[in-house]
Amino acid sequence: MHRVRLLAFALALTASPAAAQEVMNASTAQKFVAGKHFSYSCFDGTEGSGRIFTDGSASGTIRPGGQGELRHMRVPAGTLFVQGERICANLRGLPFQPCFNVTKLSETSFRGAVSGIGFMYCEFDRGSTTQVARRRAPQLMLRGSLAGAMPAVP
């Protein structure tokens, strides 16, 4: 089960948004995706959001199967990489090294499917404004002479 989640997360983070059912090569996909934030939903109901970095690392959220609590996941540098004209992933615990077919669906969305297993896919959208997780900064307390001079920040 954990391996399926890792594969879904890698799939979710490896595809790159594109336009009008255009298959993208690795170079085009990298340029389209690197450093950008997107939300995703997968064939099995898994959903979340995240960002892929130029060093092949990724960080984001995942809700496996679309149920339960949202989890934060991070994969280290080099996890996602270019192999020839494909984007691939090196995921600990998987018995194989998956590579992905990346298809541009629009100027802000794409589909990433495991090569050879087309029904295992995730769709990604850069345009989503849904906030999946948020961290609130702690409130600062002023002491001494500044305490009465500055208004409290909510």
Image (spheres, rainbow, N blue to C red):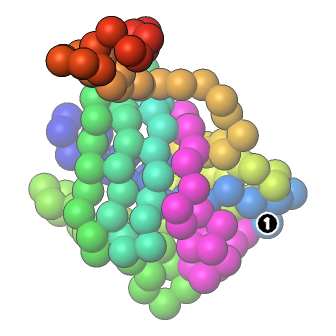
Q: Nearer the viewer, residue 134 or 146?
A: 146
Residue 128's spot in the image, x, y percent?
A: 67, 33
Magenta range is 23-45
Residue 96's spot in the image, x, y percent?
A: 24, 67
Q: Nearer the viewer, residue 62 or 128?
A: 128
Assess whether residue 113 is covered by the magenta stretch: no
Q: Vertical placement of 21 versus 79: above or below?
A: above
Assess whether residue 29 is covered by the magenta stretch: yes
Q: Nearer the viewer, residue 85 or 144?
A: 144
Q: Name the residue located 66 percent from the left edge and 42 percent from the top edge.
A: 125
Q: Vertical placement of 69 versus 45: above or below?
A: above
Disc 1 crowd, CA 10 A, few/some/many (<14, 14-19, 20+): few
Q: Vertical placement of 119 versus 21: above or below?
A: above
- Give the tally of numbered discs: 1
Residue 113's spot in the image, x, y percent?
A: 54, 55
Identify residue type, mark 1.
Answer: Glu
Q: Place residue 112 in its image quadrant.
A: bottom right
Outermost residue, bottom direction?
A: 84
Judge from the rendering whether residue 55 lies leftward or rightward of residue 15; answer left or right.
Answer: left
Q: Name the residue located 81 percent from the left edge and 55 percent from the top edge.
A: 107
Q: Name the residue located 28 percent from the left edge and 74 percent from the top edge.
A: 78
Q: Nearer the viewer, residue 120 or 62?
A: 62
Residue 84's spot in the image, x, y percent?
A: 49, 90
Please tell me whether mark 1 sits on a helix, a strand or a loop. strand
> Do we see residue 117 in this rendering?
no
> Which image quadrant: the C terminus?
top left
Residue that mark 1 sits on: 22
